[in-house]
Amino acid sequence: MPPRVWHDTSTQTDAEVFLHAFNVLIQTDEHASGKLISMGIWNLESLAHDRDYGVKLVQPEPLRHLLLLARTNVGWQIRQGAARVIGSSLWNNLEAMEAVKGSHLITTLVEILKAEKHTGVRASLIFAMSAAASVEDEMKEFMDSNGSQFLRDIFQKDEPEVKAKCATFVQDNLLWNRNLVRVDEELSRWCQIFQESLYQGTADIAAPKILESL
């Protein structure tokens, strides 16, 4: 979890900081930039781990703004922060995951990932996808749209930071959804490319996560 922008000596409560950052988010468009939105996203990422704040951040309107920033903002730090806010809001938060059911969130995240060029943002988008896939309906949608094949393609040509996130996705989602059609087949393919990356020495810093997934 990132450190909070406000200081320990600040007179602002978490609730006040969240309300201000949330209002900044709701007023953003694709051209948002500057210190205000940067600090707002950073604060939201810090607070999104709280169950109640996480639920509020994945309601339709704030989620729409977060996805807009993740897709279109010119600043990679803002795109990355928006993706992290989504992932942090959903992670281990059953109420937040319930809120995104039927939203086709994982399909949207995959579409954004396909266009993203920055390694750090891609890694954060996969983190958000992993959190969203905790909802069985979203995971089924991921499989039906050939999302696993897409991630395998990314894994084989991307940077170690992204490889590690792909391995985490497999460990956190595919292994726990073997009841879904084609998941066992995909796991077999993942095991093959994981082993190849280790044999060929292309795993680099992702090796520990890949070994853990295997």
Image (tube, helix red, strand yellow):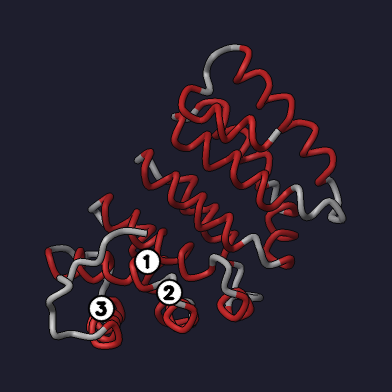
Q: Foreground residue, 126 or 212?
A: 212
Mark 3 residue crowding within 10 angstroms, few (<14) / some (14–19) / many (20+): many
In the rendered view, does 35 fall on the left or right side of 150? left
Question: Which structural element holds mark 3?
Answer: helix
Is mark 2 in CB contact (under 8 Å) with mark 1?
Answer: yes
Q: How many marks?
A: 3
**Quadrant location, the C terminus:** top right
Residue drawn at x 57%, y 60% as measured from the top left: 131
Front disc: 1 or 3: 3
Measured along the vertical axis of the image, is residue 214 above or below residue 104? above
Residue 21: image tag: 3
**Lower position in the chain sequence, tag 2 or tag 3:** 3
Kindly give the residue lying farthest to the top in the view shown: 200
Q: Which residue is mark 2?
A: 64
The x and y percentages for residue 3 are 26, 61
Residue bearing mark 1: 68
